[in-house]
Amino acid sequence: MIRKIAFALALAAPSATVAQSLPTTPYLPLDLATKAAQTALEACAADGYNVSVAIVGRDGSLKVHLKADNSGPHTVGSSQGKAFTSASMGRDTAGLAGFIGENPQHDGLRYMDSRMVIQGGGLPINIDDALVGGIGVGGAPGGHLDAACARKGLDAIGAE
C-alpha cells in the first residue's frame, strides 16, 4: 500500500512542478490580432488602397493575414516581412530604414534574416509596455500610408 501511495505521489510531483513553471510572458491574443488586422485593412480600403495586413506574434510567427480583393501579389510578402521585422527588432520599419540610411555600417541588418523587409509600414505591437508582436501593411502607394493604416489597427486594440 505504501508503495502505491509513493508511486502516485512521484507521478503527481513532476506535473505540479511543470504547472508552476509555465511561462507568464505577455502575448498577443488571437482576437486582438484579428481586430487590429481587420481595422487596418478597412482603414486602407476607406482611403482607396488594396493592401495586405499581417500580424505576427513576438516570436515572428504569423497569427493573422488578410489580403484585400484586388491587392497585388507582392503585398503578401511585404506585409508579412514588415510585421516580422517590427516584432524582431522592436521598432517601426520606417525608423529602422532611416537608421540604416544614416548609419551605413549597420546595413547588414537588412540581410540578417531573409524575412526582413525594411520599408515603411511595419509597427511593433506593445501592450502594457511589453513587445508582443508586429503589424505590417503592404500595398498603399507609400510606406507612410501603410504605417497610417497599421497605426489605426493598433489604436483599435489599445496597443502602443
Image: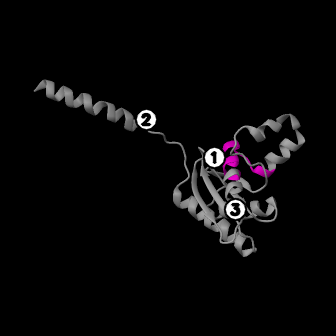
Amino acid type at mark 1: Leu
Disc on the earlier residue, 2 or 1: 2
Residue 54 coordinates in the image, percent (x, y): 64, 57
In terms of secondary structure, where does tag 1 sit? strand
Residue at the spot of label 3: 73
Q: Residue at x 58, y 64 (%)?
A: 35
Q: Residues within 10 Å of mark 1 (few under 14, many from 20)?
A: many
- Magenta highlight range: 82-94
Q: Quadrant of the C terminus?
A: bottom right
Instruction: Kindly report the secondary structure that dominates the magenta region of the rendered protein.
Output: helix
Residue sitting at x 66%, y 63%: 153
Which one is in front, 61 or 96? 61
On the image, numbered disc 2 is attached to which residue? 21
Task: Tell whether 121 sits left or right of 5.
Answer: right
Query: Disc 1 vs disc 3: Cβ atoms closer than 8 Å?
Result: no
Q: In the figure, is residue 58 to the left or right of 86?
A: left
Q: CA distance from mark 2 to mark 1?
A: 21 Å
Farthest residue to the left: give it.
Answer: 1
- The residue that disc 1 covers is 131
Find numbered disc 2 in the image and state the secondary structure of the residue it sits on.
loop
